[in-house]
Image (spheres, helix red, strand yellow):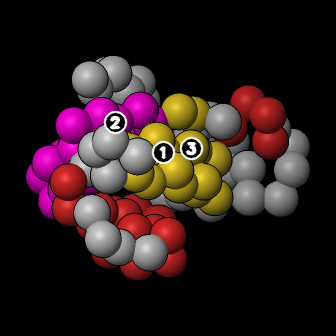
Amino acid sequence: MTHPATGPAAQEITARLTAALAPSKLDVINDSAKHRGHMGDDGSGESHFTVVIESAAFAGKSRLERQRMVNRALGDIMVERVHALAIRATAPGE
């Protein structure tokens, strides 16, 4: 089940992960309010996220490999628009 993301950065994260990893579950959670005024808060309200993703593409992959797959799928958004990203990546059945 995929939950709709709000805000342009969250929507872009959702679109890129969906296109690259065909997740069976995807939640893009905006944690930015918890970091307001801290380093990396650019005032956009979209600087810190948690991604909870389940994809068959992760089967047999290590935690590090899964994180790299997510970061590759997100590409330049991680440099240009997102300061911090927490990733919880699983394969179906885990």
Quarter of the N terminus within the rendering = top left
Dot 1 or dot 2, earlier in sequence: 2
The vertical placement of 52 against 60, above or below, is: above
**In the figure, residue 67 lies in which quadrant?**
bottom left
The secondary element bearing badge 2 is classed as strand
x%, y% of residue 88?
52, 50
Instruction: Measure the C-alpha gap from mark 3 to mark 2.
Output: 10 Å
Secondary structure mostly seen in the magenta stretch: helix
Q: Residue 58: horizontal and vertical position, in percent?
A: 29, 62
| Above/below status of 27 relative to 54 | above
Q: Amino acid at mark 3?
A: Thr
Give, as a single range, the part of the protein colored magenta: 9-28
Query: Label 2 sits on what residue type?
Result: Leu
Residue linked to disc 3: 50
Residue drawn at point x = 35 percent, y = 73 percent: 61
Q: Foreground residue, 35 or 1?
A: 1
Q: On the image, numbered disc 2 is attached to which residue?
A: 26
Do callouts 1 and 3 mark residues in contact (Cβ within 8 Å)? yes
Q: Is residue 41 above or below residue 57?
A: above
Mark 1 lies on residue: 51
Query: What is the x, y in percent for residue 64?
Result: 50, 77
